[in-house]
Image (spheres, helix red, strand yellow):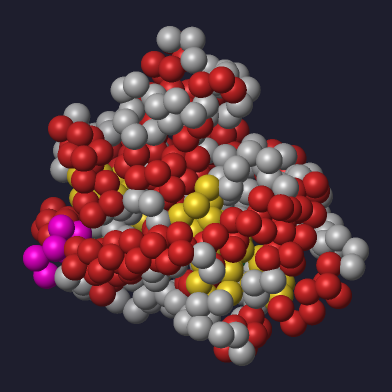
Amino acid sequence: MEEQGQKCRRVVLVPCPYQGHITPMLQLGSILHSKGLSITVVHTQFNSPNPSLRPEFDFRSLPDGVPDHIISTANLVDTIALINVNCLAPFRKCLDQMMEQHGQYGEIVCIIYDELMYFSEAAANQLKLKSMILRTTSAATLTARVAIFRLKEEGYIPLKDTILHDPVPWLHPLRFKDLPVPGIQISESLLQLITNMYKIRTSSAVIWNTTDCLEKSVLTELQQQCQVPNFPLGPLPKIAPSSSSGLFKEDTSCIAWLNNQAHKSVIYVSLGSIASIDNRELVEMAWGLANSKQPFLWVVRPTSINGTEETDLLPEGFKEAVGENGCIVKWAPQKEVLAHSAIGGFWSHCGWNSVLESICEGVPMICRPCFGDQWVNAGYVSQVWKIGLELGNKLDREEMEKTVRRLMVEKEGGEIRHRIKNLRKEIELSITKGGSSYKSLSELLELIN
Ligand code: UDP
């Protein structure tokens, strides 16, 4: 920890322990640090970020008490609920210690917590510290999640196949199929989680990793319903320097492979850090990619297939069939990959970070959402911003091959590419002086200081 002494002003960050949440929180930390604030990251033991990758930050670990059997069932809702119960007391203790050692650590001016780490607000409130919420999803996702209560009341849940393509009457432009709802009944614990993450409690602001360029009307509506200021200052990957959180080991060998590929010829395929598919779909993806004849870089995580830890998941004969035309890794340096001149498309699960990273690099997408907010994001990518194509329901190799070719070589793909380039330019303007995200960041800094 580099800054010491009375004058240092410290912001305490509390990320939620998953890749898609840790990344934007650390990006926000880098931005605040570049503006002269000192940063402490208080994290769970489970999925802890690697402190050596951010020597400029101070890291502290909380005993989260989440048993391995809950982690291994990948039940995110239960895990998060447990963290919120178990971490309040240790977090309070951690803050107490930092406040006692004020001379060494400086004054804590604000606690910024992931919307899922709402125990942080209770501790901040008890100690009369200012707190703010970081929302790591799109604004449309929050609106859609809150709408679940009404959908349930009006008998729409579980969603029926016959209405999936219809618009949700009060949620324009989303269709029922874009809602972040599991196909089955919604559990009480999920509804409770949504209530808890939506509540502002005593927090004094909401920070968003999104921007007016993408979601002006939803953001305006949310601000009208909210008593505290909302700061849409994203996209964070565009403002913060690129750096790994260290949860997964990056295989950088794919960059050398990309260096040998033609300009905009490669389709990058990744379903993020958590999503998994079944074995049938993985086999169809493999042959869809091979048959498209388009060069591809594919991230196949060891846990890419539901319920398996197998590392050799690909169908027999596939690697021989594609030869040098394909590169497969377990985890890629994604921001660097998307910025590479050989990349022409991104077949994505549409996690919010991936969507933002793709837009920031002007890379058009193929959308294969798997769960939760990915459905909302995919709806916006394909229907609202029109910067990507949806994969249909069949998920077979013919359809996949066709979709890759539509995006990478056909006229339709050229038009999509043109639109995403324009969006990228608008985003660049929004983060420069006079732009909406630039202004939001300045206002946030004023409130923190
Ligand atoms: N990512 C990466 N390498 C990979 C796959 C993903 O660095 O091989 C990063 C990606 O850049 C993004 C994050 O992991 O920042 C995934 O977040 P996202 O919100 O897209 O999806 P999630 O993993 O939360 O479903």
Vertically, is 185 above or below 96? above
Q: Is residue 220 left or right of residue 392?
A: left
Q: Residue at x 50, y 44 (%)?
A: 374
Task: Please tell me which residue lies in front, 78 or 202.
Answer: 78
The total number of labels drawn is 0
30 lies left or right of 406: left
Which residue is more in the foreground, 295 or 65? 295
Q: Residue 387: horizontal and vertical position, in percent?
A: 40, 56
Q: Is residue 115 magenta?
A: no
**Quadrant (top left, top right, bottom left, bottom right) of the C terminus:** bottom left
Residue 338 seen by the camera:
yes
Image height of 170 relative to 215, above or below: above
Nearest the viewer among 26 and 259 is: 259
Q: In this orientation, does residue 19 appear?
A: no
Q: Quadrant of the N terminus?
A: bottom left
Q: Which residues are magenta?
A: 433-438
Displayed quadrant of residue 272: bottom right
Q: Is residue 274 left or right of residue 215?
A: right
In the rendered view, would you say 223 is above or below 93?
above
Rendering quarter of residue 109: bottom left
Q: Residue at x 68, y 40 (%)?
A: 394
